[in-house]
């Protein structure tokens, strides 16, 4: 607040004692910095917390992952149990009486209680209905989510292992070795990802291992590039030079100094590659190159649902929404992480 | 002399995650027609914020808590964005610090120079380029006609700064704000640019507000000098008064840390410590923690301005009648002596 | 570039050698002699090296061999008719997607952190997260089935190209919007934009005269990945909308183990990608004055 300027009288009125020289012990006072100091991760976490979308995604994804794990042990129905009599039942949620969610469906223009028609025992509910083979859709959804997430995580992990290793080595070696390694990458990336995946899957039997392998082979390239770029940036910085002069071996330098500094970039990239992997799995299953029935993954569920889409749209909507929600969640989280780790973003 | 700009009791704060930073804590000064006012201070003293506020270019998290900026009688702080756009570039123009980044890399410089003229005076592109050419010649770009189509990266740093000056001048503004225009340049180029500015000022009789932390530059160009510290002006006067009769301990520090040929000691005087934290400004005089001449009252009350002459005032309790006589550092004594000599001569 | 193509062709060839099964339908019903005869006809009995050499030579001539799926149909013929629709779909999608993406990204950057920004960011995230086949089906459901305003499939009138174009364009739209927003925000905080403001230009003038050009140049780097995305997207979109393009054929060929066609499409796609990358490099040189005009005339 601005103070009123003193008049000459007011000044004269001030006690002369106050004009004695000031005793000071002030070295610490002068050098103190007022704002609290935070480590890099604490700082980033603080920024991340402010991003409501990212926080929401974290919560959402944790819930989904938790459900996936819990349903290994507990499930509304046996996801593989086929019951030919109960095929294509609409969803029936206890207590809700909206058409479409109460076991009734339109058949030829008329509302019919399909549960009664199929002689489903009282008290048996299929919360999301059943599919063409009488399997409970909800349980299959849990299995499908679990498998899709599993595939995605393993693929992302492999991405990291291949990508980071390749990038670190290429970046640290530099010179001709680096050149050769980079040319190799360029050539590899000249082939569209999908084509490689498809080729691999045509050659090898489709199944979880081959899908994971196919994805790992293609998706590690961006990670390798980014890691290499960052490594080269850091390599030239003084602290690496200092470590080298002190006699640290190259691998030690890589692990102790470079890796922690690029970890933020790696995390962000990994967060982006997970939805990418989920998408590819779904896509491949959709065009028939994914898992084989009766395996369930989100892609398989989508593919099955698509076949009866015109008549029973809910069979496709359910996995579609689930897939979209998971991908949105990871994308929001990855965006949030990237913004949080980058201090240059304007507050 | 006519006053072109009157800044009265300006208070500006910024909202940050750590709290409110009080960047400008009651700043007042005037700018007269045709003069060059230098504003001197360290980083964080508030120099740049002051100039941005004159142009209405403050960041979005800035709050003007109090004060007025009167330009030809009307308060700039109350103007709308549209009104401000009419003033910027035309009545008040700015020269920026870093010539390597102040120009659009993808636009030919001729167009960049003509841009504000074309907008403000609504002339055609052809006419605009013609006047741009005149200005490029004025600021000393050789072969200007051929180079209108060139891009910034085809010019050296000194030339780019001249182009920036041309951009600022093309509408013949009343006030030119130069925000550390030579800091990013080599010393020899610095001298050239300063000469250019002085030259042009004479030609078009505009007023210049010159921001810098380099007193050597100030000595070269300024008519009057205002010294800023911790978001306030601590001393203001004519260039001669500030250089040869400084009264505020901070000014002593600044001058004392400037190497001169006549210096006595063999160690440069350096002001210890670092600038104050404006998140939580100290009560009393912001400079007191680093002030070896601080009085007890400095820690309690902010000093008001005390007049040293009709044109010179300083905000330090040392000028109060009750204050003890202190002996400033030797370099300052030498200056004071020079000042007395000069003035006794003129009063003869 | 040629090196890349050659490598791809070679890899594809050798990969094909590992493919299980034979290309002949009802192989179980054929006697060994018949199979041997068929093999001889198809040139499959020659040593690998010779096959490889022939393969490369044929490639250079543009001869991709004969389709296994459609006997007596050279693959080249099979594919040439389909390039048209795929190309049209791809070009439409890129133009539609990047155009609206740029607009969305620009508005987003100008109104940073307001509801406009949040909404458009949401749209961008949705566009990137929801798989394009879900989009395709969704569009079909809403516009073709429920509302009945657009044809559900096939490639006949211009109207029938609308839904597939939109479905395919969502991904480029989302990516370019996001990218432009990031670039613009950075540009809008740059020194030369501050100088432009000091000249008295309005925010929108600055965005279009200074902001866009500086943000669009980096956008070129997106074109490569964008093209790849379109290729993958077209596989599904063409299938769902029954468009007679390369993507649809590719999927069919996979189902029927039509190796020559699979190889041919692979090579075709890779060639297209390499081509796009080349074009981007050239465009960069033209569009960015720092590259286009040499730094010769300093003074």
Image (tube, coloured by chain):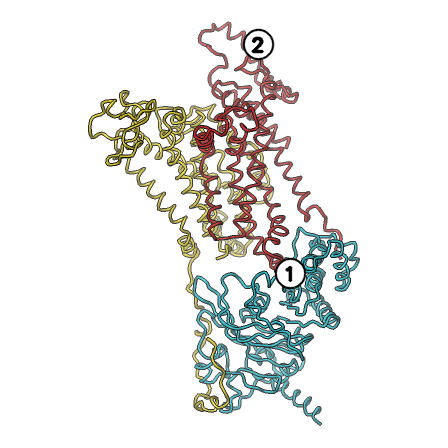
Chain colours: A yellow, B cyan, C red
Q: Residue C120: give x, y in percent of width and height.
A: 49, 46
Tag on residue B91? none
Crowding near the residue tagged with mark 1, few <14, some 14–19, many ≥20 C-alpha atoms within 10 Å: many
Tag on residue C41? 2
Q: Is residue A233 above or below residue B301?
A: above
Q: Along the horizontal axis of the image, is B181 left or right of C136?
A: right
Q: Residue A115: give x, y in percent of width and height.
A: 25, 26
Q: Nearer the viewer, residue B90 or A229?
A: B90
Element carrying mark 1: loop
Q: Chain of mark 1?
A: C
Which of discs 1 and 2 lies nearer the camera? The answer is 1
Q: Residue B48: give x, y in percent of width and height.
A: 57, 68
In the figure, residue B41 lies in which quadrant?
bottom right
Name which of mark 1 and mark 2 comes first in the sequence.
Answer: 2
User: Disc 1 designates what residue?
Assistant: C199
Q: Is residue A30 above or below residue C66?
A: below
Q: Nearer the viewer, residue A215 or B172?
A: B172
- At a point 39% along the width and 36% down the height, the residue shown is A321
Q: Chain of mark 2?
A: C
Count of marks, rendered view: 2
């Amino acid at each position: 607040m601005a103070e009123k300027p003193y008049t000459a009288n007011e000044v004269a009125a001030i006690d002369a004692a106050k004009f004695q020289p000031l005793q000071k012990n002030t070295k610490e006072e002068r050098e103190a910095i007022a704002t609290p100091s935070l480590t890099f991760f604490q700082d980033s976490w603080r920024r991340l917390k402010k991003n409501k979308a990212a926080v929401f995604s974290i919560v959402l994804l944790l819930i989904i992952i938790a459900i996936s794990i819990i349903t290994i042990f507990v499930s509304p129905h046996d996801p593989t149990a086929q019951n030919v009599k109960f095929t294509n039942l609409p969803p029936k949620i206890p207590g809700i009486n909206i058409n479409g969610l109460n076991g009734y469906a339109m058949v030829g223009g008329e509302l019919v209680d399909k549960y009664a028609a199929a002689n489903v025992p009282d008290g048996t509910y299929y919360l999301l209905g059943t599919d063409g083979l009488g399997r409970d859709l909800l349980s299959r959804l849990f299995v499908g989510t679990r498998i899709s997430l599993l595939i995605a995580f393993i693929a992302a992990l492999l991405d990291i292992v291949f990508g980071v290793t390749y990038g670190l080595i290429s970046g640290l070696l530099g010179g001709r070795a680096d050149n050769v390694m980079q040319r190799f990458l360029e050539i590899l990336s000249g082939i569209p990802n999908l084509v490689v995946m498809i080729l691999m899957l045509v050659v090898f039997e489709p199944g979880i291992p081959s899908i994971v392998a196919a994805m790992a082979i293609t998706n590690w390239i961006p990670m390798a590039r980014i890691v290499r770029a960052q490594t080269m940036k850091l390599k030239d910085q003084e602290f690496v030079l200092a470590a080298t002069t002190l006699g640290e071996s190259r691998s030690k330098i890589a692990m102790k100094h470079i890796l922690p500094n690029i970890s933020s970039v790696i995390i962000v990239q990994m967060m982006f590659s997970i939805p990418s992997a989920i998408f590819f799995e779904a896509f491949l299953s959709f065009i028939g190159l994914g898992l084989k029935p009766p395996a369930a993954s989100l892609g398989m569920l989508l593919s099955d649902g698509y076949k009866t889409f015109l008549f029973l749209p809910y069979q496709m909507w359910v996995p579609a929404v689930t897939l979209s929600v998971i991908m949105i969640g990871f994308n929001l989280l990855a965006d949030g992480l990237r913004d949080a780790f980058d201090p240059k973003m304007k507050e | 002399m006519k006053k072109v700009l009157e800044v009265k009791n300006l208070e500006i704060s910024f909202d940050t995650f750590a709290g409110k930073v009080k960047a400008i804590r009651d700043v007042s000064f005037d700018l007269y027609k045709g003069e060059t006012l230098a504003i001197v201070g360290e980083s964080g003293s508030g120099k740049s914020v002051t100039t941005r506020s004159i142009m209405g270019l403050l960041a979005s998290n800035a709050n003007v808590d109090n004060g007025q900026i009167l330009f030809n009688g009307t308060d700039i702080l109350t103007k709308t964005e549209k009104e401000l756009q009419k003033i910027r570039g035309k009545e008040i123009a700015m020269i920026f610090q870093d010539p390597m980044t102040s120009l659009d890399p993808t636009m030919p410089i001729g167009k960049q120079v003509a841009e504000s003229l074309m907008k403000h005076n609504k002339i055609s592109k052809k006419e605009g380029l013609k006047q741009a050419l005149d200005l490029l010649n004025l600021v000393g770009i050789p072969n200007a006609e051929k180079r209108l189509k060139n891009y910034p990266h085809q010019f050296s740093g000194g030339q780019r700064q001249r182009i920036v000056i041309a951009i600022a001048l093309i509408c013949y503004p009343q006030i030119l704000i130069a925000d550390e225009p030579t800091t990013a340049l080599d010393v020899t180029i610095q001298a050239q640019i300063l000469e250019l500015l002085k030259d042009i000022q004479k030609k078009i009789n505009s007023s210049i507000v010159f921001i810098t932390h380099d007193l050597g530059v100030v000595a070269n160009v300024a008519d009057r000098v205002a010294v800023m510290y911790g978001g306030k002006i601590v001393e203001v006067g004519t260039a001669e008064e500030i250089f040869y009769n400084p009264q505020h301990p901070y000014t002593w520090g600044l001058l004392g840390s400037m190497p001169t040929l006549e210096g006595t000691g063999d160690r440069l005087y350096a002001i210890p410590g670092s600038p104050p934290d404006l998140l939580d400004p100290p009560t009393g005089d912001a400079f007191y923690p680093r002030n070896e001449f601080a009085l007890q009252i400095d820690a309690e009350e902010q000093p008001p301005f005390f007049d040293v002459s009709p044109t010179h005032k300083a905000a330090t309790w040392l000028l109060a009648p009750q204050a003890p006589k202190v002996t400033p550092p030797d370099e300052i004594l030498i200056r004071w002596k020079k000042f007395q000599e000069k003035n006794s001569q003129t009063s003869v | 570039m040629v090196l890349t193509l050659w490598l791809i062709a070679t890899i594809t060839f050798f990969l094909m050698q590992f493919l299980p099964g034979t290309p002949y339908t009802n192989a179980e019903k054929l006697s060994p002699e018949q199979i041997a005869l068929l093999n001889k006809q198809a040139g499959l009995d020659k040593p690998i090296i010779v096959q490889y050499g022939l393969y490369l030579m044929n490639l250079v001539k543009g001869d991709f061999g004969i389709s296994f799926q459609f006997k007596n149909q050279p693959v080249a013929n099979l594919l040439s008719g389909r390039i048209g629709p795929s190309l049209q779909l791809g070009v439409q999608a890129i133009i539609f997607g990047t155009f609206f993406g740029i607009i969305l990204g620009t508005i987003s950057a100008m109104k940073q952190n307001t509801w406009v920004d949040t909404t458009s960011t949401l749209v961008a995230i949705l566009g990137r997260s929801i798989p394009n086949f879900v989009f395709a089906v969704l569009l079909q459901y809403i516009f073709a089935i429920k509302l009945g305003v657009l044809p559900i499939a096939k490639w006949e009138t211009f109207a029938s190209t609308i839904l597939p174009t939109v479905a395919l364009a969502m991904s480029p739209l989302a990516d370019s919007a996001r990218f432009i927003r990031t670039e613009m925000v950075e540009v809008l905080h740059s020194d030369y934009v501050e100088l432009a403001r000091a000249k008295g230009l309005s925010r929108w003038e600055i965005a279009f005269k200074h902001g866009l050009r500086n943000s669009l140049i980096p956008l070129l780097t997106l074109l490569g990945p964008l093209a790849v995305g379109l290729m993958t997207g077209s596989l599904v979109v063409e299938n769902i909308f029954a468009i007679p393009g390369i993507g649809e054929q590719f999927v069919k060929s996979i189902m029927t183990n039509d190796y020559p066609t699979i190889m041919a499409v692979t090579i075709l796609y890779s060639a297209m990608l390499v081509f796009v990358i080349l074009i981007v490099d050239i465009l960069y040189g033209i569009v960015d004055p720092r590259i286009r005009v040499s730094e010769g005339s300093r003074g």
